[in-house]
Structure formats: structure tokens, C-alpha cells
Image (cartoon, grey):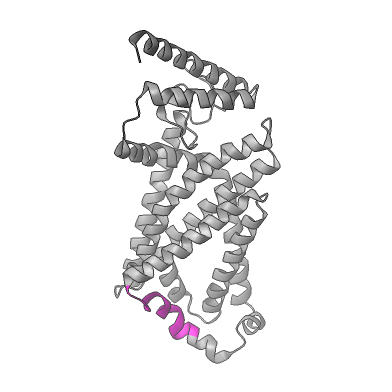
């Protein structure tokens, strides 16, 4: 472009960005905000260039976008966690204290004993580590995508997925507790389960938030609300691919490893704690800069005057 046209483009880009910030702050017109967002995105591609910046994009995604999306969805993620854990605890406590319930769910004493002594543990070492890790990753990613994607149906299927998985894990936990084999159960579940289930909870939280946008779009149109939350949910699901991959490696190599149970559990706990600290630290930092984790949202769009609570400061306006 000629120099004068380029200068005009930059001026219009900055002016439109300012207008977009004003519209978002006032929350006056979602359709106008969406239109201005498209204009800013298109002009940004010209102003900032279109050369490939793959590694920078990946770095920004890991440092800002993915953690910001997790932080933005922290409440539905907590609700997702409560749904699963409550179901799991109910089933585990019921079976652990009710021989009749154990007999109802596991009527064959021989198969029950086989599960306790061999099958449950053999499941983790029945295949080579790489093959098993790949199969586990595929299965877990499928559960995560289902929990997220089902959210579009008002979140009801997402709740059912979380409850169903809580029941399944609770059945195994209840049987081991009822048989006095609780340490064996936890020694096999915790090395990979801490990270794996956390990823499922996150996917479920993304689905619940998407469902809430369908039910209660607020001052946005329902389509705009779903589109906005969908852009954040997609970021979460893409980020969870790596989390499920790590969980699969833990389940394929650490859980069946011939090392002390304490070492296996400690390994899983360290990896899980590292992920949680990463999500909280970078999530709060990104939120303090006005990022919400929406797909296509960049650092340039963040307001430097927004703190982690979303309140305005003298140097910036509130980001809705």
C-alpha cells in the first residue's frame, strides 16, 4: 500500500479499536461489537502483517490464551468437579458400607474376586506402554470432547457424562473399599487419575459454560452468546489435547511401573500440581491484563488497566 494509505489505515484501525473498547465497556450493542471486532481483526492482519509466527503463536497460546480461558471458566469447572466427585463419593460410600449393594452390582463372587486380584491391575499392563498410552489418550479425549460438545444442548448431556463417569469410578472404588483393598485401588488410580480427571472436569466445565450461554445469554443474542463462549471453549479443548496426552503417558508408563506405590503416586501428584500451578498463575496474570481466552484474542486487545476482578482502573476500561 502507498505510505499515505497505510498511515490512514493505521489511524482508522486505532480509532475502530477505541470504538470497540467503548462499546464493550458500555455493553450497549452486541451486534455492533461483533461487527467492530471483525473490522479490527481484518485490519490487524494488514497492519501487523501476515508472516507466519508459529512459535510465537504457540507461546502466546500457552502463556496467555489457554490459561485465560481456564481462569474465565473456573466456576463452571468447579461445578463440574463437584458433580463428578459427589457422584463418585456417593457410590463409593454406598458400596463400601452395603454388602447388598456389592452383591447387586457384582453378583458373581468369582468374577468379583478376579477383578480385585488380577483384572483391575492387569488392565494397566495388558499392552505395551506406547500402545496403551495412545489408546487411553484417544478414549479420554473422546470423553472430554463429548463433555464439551454436549454442552450446546443446554448442558444436560454434559451433566449426564460427568455423573455416568463418576458412577463407574465409584463402583470400582466402592468394591475395593468394601473388600479392604482401598490402598491398592488408590495406588492404581492416583498416578494418572489426578491429571486425567482434572482434564475431564475442565472439559465438563467448558460444556456447562456453553450450556449456560444457551439458557441465559444475558444482554447478548443467544447466537452471539454461544459464539463468544464457543471461542473460549474451543481454546480449552485444544489445550486439553496436550493434557490428555500427558495423562495417557502417565497411565501407560507410570501406573504399571514396577516401583513403590508411593513413588508412582508422587510422580502423578507432582505433574498434577505443576499443571494446577501453571493454570492458576498464568490464568490470573492473563486475566489481570484483560484477556478472557477467546479464540483469536491477542495481547494487543487486552486492556492494561483491568485487574483480575474486572474492575476499571485509571489507565483502562472494564473488559466485559
Q: Can you say whether 119 is above or below 15 in the image?
A: below
| Secondary structure that dominates the magenta span | helix
Residue 78 in view here: no
Q: Nearer the viewer, residue 93 or 146?
A: 146
Number of on-image labels: 0
Q: Residue at x 38, y 65 (%)?
A: 134
Image-based side of 169 in relation to 276, left or right:
right
Q: Residue at x 29, y 75 (%)?
A: 258
Q: Quadrant of the N terminus?
A: top left
Residue 122, position as x, y percentages in the image: 40, 80
Question: In the drawing, does residue 118 fall left or right of residue 157?
Answer: left
Quadrant occupied by the C terminus: top right
| Image quadrant in which you'd find residue 147 | bottom right
In the rendered image of this protein, does residue 95 appear above or below residue 58?
A: below
Residue 29 in the image: state x and y as whole percent: 65, 23
Rendered position, 46 above or below 108: above
Q: Position of residue 236 (x, y in %)?
A: 48, 46
Please report the bounds of the magenta region as a residue range: 115-128
Measuring from the top left, give residue 91's x and y in whole percent: 61, 70
Residue 248 sits in quarter: bottom left
| The one of 259 and 108 positioned closer to us in this rendering | 108
Furthest residue in direction top, as rendered: 4
Residue visible at 63% across and 34% down? Answer: 224
Residue extending furthest bottom?
110
Residue 7 magenta-drawn?
no
Q: Residue at x 34, y 25 (%)?
A: 49
User: Is residue 18 shown to the viewer in this render?
Assistant: yes
Would residue 5 appear left or right of 209 to someone viewing this image? left
Magenta stretch holds residue 121? yes
Q: Is residue 39 left or right of residue 152?
A: left
Amino acid at each position: 500500500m502507498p505510505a499515505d494509505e497505510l498511515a490512514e489505515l493505521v489511524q482508522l484501525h486505532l480509532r475502530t479499536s477505541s470504538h470497540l473498547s467503548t462499546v464493550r465497556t458500555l455493553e450497549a450493542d452486541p451486534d455492533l461489537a461483533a461487527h467492530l471486532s471483525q473490522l479490527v481483526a481484518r485490519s490487524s492482519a494488514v497492519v501487523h502483517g501476515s508472516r507466519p509466527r508459529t512459535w510465537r503463536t504457540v507461546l502466546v497460546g500457552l502463556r496467555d490464551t489457554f490459561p485465560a480461558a481456564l481462569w474465565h471458566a473456573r466456576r463452571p469447572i468447579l461445578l463440574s468437579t463437584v458433580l463428578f466427585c459427589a457422584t463418585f463419593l456417593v457410590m463409593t460410600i454406598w458400596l463400601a458400607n452395603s454388602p447388598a449393594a456389592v452383591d447387586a452390582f457384582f453378583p458373581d463372587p468369582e468374577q468379583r474376586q478376579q477383578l480385585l486380584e488380577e483384572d483391575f491391575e492387569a488392565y494397566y499392563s495388558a499392552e505395551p506402554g506406547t500402545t496403551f498410552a495412545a489408546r487411553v489418550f484417544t478414549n479420554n479425549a473422546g470423553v472430554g470432547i463429548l463433555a464439551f460438545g454436549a454442552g450446546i444442548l443446554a448442558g444436560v448431556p454434559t451433566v449426564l457424562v460427568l455423573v455416568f463417569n463418576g458412577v463407574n469410578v465409584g463402583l470400582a472404588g466402592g468394591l475395593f473399599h468394601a473388600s479392604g483393598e482401598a490402598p491398592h485401588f488408590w495406588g492404581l488410580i492416583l498416578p494418572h487419575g489426578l491429571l486425567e480427571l482434572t482434564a475431564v472436569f475442565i472439559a465438563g466445565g467448558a460444556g456447562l459454560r456453553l450450556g449456560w450461554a444457551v439458557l441465559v445469554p444475558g444482554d447478548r443474542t443467544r447466537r452471539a452468546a454461544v459464539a463468544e463462549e464457543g471461542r473460549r471453549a474451543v481454546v480449552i479443548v485444544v489445550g486439553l489435547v496436550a493434557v490428555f496426552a500427558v495423562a495417557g503417558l502417565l497411565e501407560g508408563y507410570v501406573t504399571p511401573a514396577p516401583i513403590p506405590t508411593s513413588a508412582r503416586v508422587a510422580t502423578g501428584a507432582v505433574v498434577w500440581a505443576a499443571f494446577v500451578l501453571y493454570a492458576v498463575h498464568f490464568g490470573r496474570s492473563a486475566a489481570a491484563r484483560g484477556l478472557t481466552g477467546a479464540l483469536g484474542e491477542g495481547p494487543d486487545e487486552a486492556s492494561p488497566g483491568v485487574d483480575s476482578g474486572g474492575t476499571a482502573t485509571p489507565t483502562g476500561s472494564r473488559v466485559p
